[in-house]
Image (tube, grey):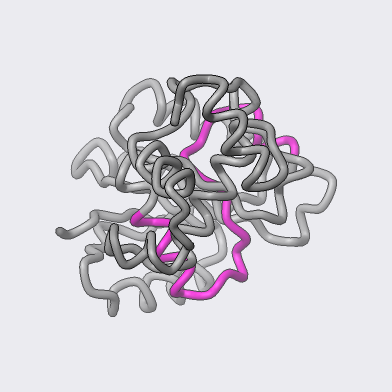
Amino acid sequence: MCIKVMIVDDHPIMAAGLRNVMEGCAGISVLGCYHSYDELLCGISKQCPDIVLESCRHGAASDHLALRINKEYPAVRILALVSAEMGPSFRAITKVQRAGYLMANASLQRLLEVIRTIYDGEEYQDEVFSDSLQFKGVRKVGRERLTKREREILKLVIGGYTNMQISEKLFLSVRTVENHRNNILQKMNVRNTASLIKTAIELGLA
């Protein structure tokens, strides 16, 4: 498996640094590194990536880019890298659906895990955004809001498996399992495993 990635960051040094790091990672192919949204869209039109890593600093412009990609290249998944300096303006980039949101200072290992999660067709939000970010419909409880992987993990949780046991059974990292469990809790609007199991049984998800 080789995940095709494009990077867009209006800071050339930051963009080059991210590209250098990504190019050394197994299973990742960096198709291009761009310093403006127009350059990125031109690049996508020539060679479509699986994932776009977008360094978010401009609310309205970022949303416009996401709208264009979602409409014209629906197979492309967008991962927004959000800097802490955005502060209160963070909500400005959450109006348009993206596949994931991750703090820009995350470790390389976490970044790669999130890229693979998004590549598998799932959504991701860094836990620091839990109070300010809600994906469209994320609070809607039901089978349709859980991904295939989340339903698989939910069944194992109900079966009494620990995170470590689930990671070994599904060949995932423990961190990835924890992320999936947190997403399931949020989507089903519960706070702990006991409430999760009770709600899953009531909804016929068990």
The x and y percentages for residue 108 are 46, 74
Residue drawn at (53%, 27%) of the image: 201
- Residue 7, quarter of picture: bottom left
Task: Residue 151: say if magenta.
Answer: no
Residue drawn at (47%, 21%) of the image: 204
Is 44 or 49 nearer to us in this picture? 49
- Residue 94, quarter of picture: top right
Above or below, 28 relative to 90: below
Q: How many labels sit on residues? A: 0
Is 14 or 203 nearer to us in this picture? 203
- Which stretch is magenta? 91-116
The x and y percentages for residue 133 are 70, 39
Residue drawn at (68%, 60%) of the image: 83
Q: Residue placed farthest to the right in the image?
A: 88
The x and y percentages for residue 27 are 21, 67
Task: Residue 115: say if magenta.
Answer: yes
Residue drawn at (38%, 77%) of the image: 21
Q: From the viewer's perspective, is 97 left or right of 42?
A: right
Image quadrant in which the C terminus is located? top left
Above or below, 86 relative to 62: below
Is 29 or 15 nearer to us in this picture? 29
Above or below, 161 relative to 151: below
Is 174 or 9 nearer to us in this picture? 174
The x and y percentages for residue 147 are 39, 34
Image quadrant in which the N terminus is located? bottom left
